Amino acid sequence: MKLFQTIAPWRHCAVAVAVGFAVTTPFAAVAAEAVDLELVLATDVSRSISAEEAYLQREGTAAAFKSPEVTRAIALGANGKIAVAYVDWSVDYLNRVIVDWRIINSKESAEAFADELLKVELTPGQRTSISSALQMSAQMIDANSYEGTRKVIDISGDGQNNAGLPLAPVREDVIANGIVVNGLPIILKGEEFAGRNFTPEIDKYYARCVIGGRGSFLIVARGFKDFAVAIRHKLIMEISALPNPIQYADTRGFIRLAAAQDLTQFLKPLLPNANGPVIVRPPATRDTDCDQRGGFGGFGGFQP
């Protein structure tokens, strides 16, 4: 099953023309704009997320795009630009595009994206349908007018899939279409209220059930106040995508990285916490039972 095969057939019409005959009509395919990365930032606004927490996610993302490290990483790409969109998600009928596709290729365009993000009203949410967030994000990537060297969906959240389609087959279809799914699980241990979908080991759930694709990873945010640090670190890694040689800023200026060097040791100086955030790669085998069925449930042997 392909979820996206009918979303944007115009992307494939150039192939049909080349095989058959040349045309010079107004309907001829227009070449997609080349970018280093097509990135959908998909942020959880389900009922377990308060208005204050939702805004902390927005503020953290905006602050990351205004940071010199993120804009520097963008500038060092082969095309020097990325395409980004931002989505609020909970269930399919409430999912909402907050900022539609924007090209970011400079400090000014990054700041404009960040400012627009903070202007839009918060989205009310209900249950937690990660599957619908992946579907919507993948369709947006398929239907846009860009052609990225890499295509990434960045999912943040604090709970398991408890609405919409089963998560595992949707995730596998997204990955099969060449899209990488990265995660930013928000651990809420010790929080006064974390909602009915509270999952203490949400990092393990995201690793086994959500992320996937070549080079996929997750970074843990330990509470919403840690979100800004985690998202900045995560964006730099997504934009840079080793093994390409890249540069990062630290207290001593810019350091040239060789392709084989470990990225994380150079990112640590960018962060207030000297130990850096927790970075997790997916296991060799992803879980197929990833859905919460009434009450609190469990997944893959992990019981919240």
Image (tube, grey):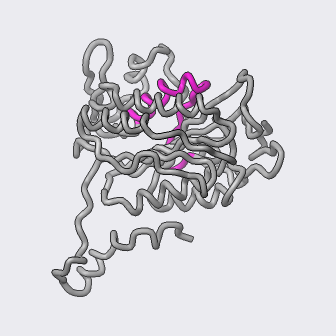
Q: Quadrant of the C terminus?
A: top right
At 31% from the left edge and 36% from the top edge, which residue is drawn? Answer: 112
Residue 153 placement (x, y as % from top left)? 47, 48
Residue 242 shows in this picture = no
Q: Position of residue 285 (x, y in %)?
A: 63, 50
In-front residue for pair 259/176: 176
How many circles with numbers are drawn on the protein? Answer: 0
Q: Is residue 224 magenta?
A: yes
Left or right relative to 225: residue 291: right
Kindly tell me whether residue 17 is visible in this rendering: yes
* Residues in magenta, as a range: 211-237
What residue lies at 20% left-to-right and 77% top-to-bottom?
A: 26
Q: Is residue 224 above or below residue 272?
A: below
194 or 50, nearer to the observer: 50
Q: Nearer the viewer, residue 105 or 54?
A: 54
96 with respect to 104 (left or right):
right
Residue at 30% x, 33% y is: 73
Residue 188, placed above or below residue 131:
above
Residue drawn 52% across and 32% down? 57
Q: Position of residue 4 (x, y in %)?
A: 48, 67
Q: Residue extending furthest right?
A: 295
Residue that extends furthest to the left in the rendered view of this protein: 24
Q: Is residue 224 above or below residue 47?
A: above
Q: Residue 82: give x, y in percent of width and height.
A: 31, 45
| Quadrant of the snapshot with the N terminus | bottom right
The relative height of residue 251 versus residue 63 in the rendered view (above or below) is above
* Residue 262 shown left or right of residue 295 in the figure: left
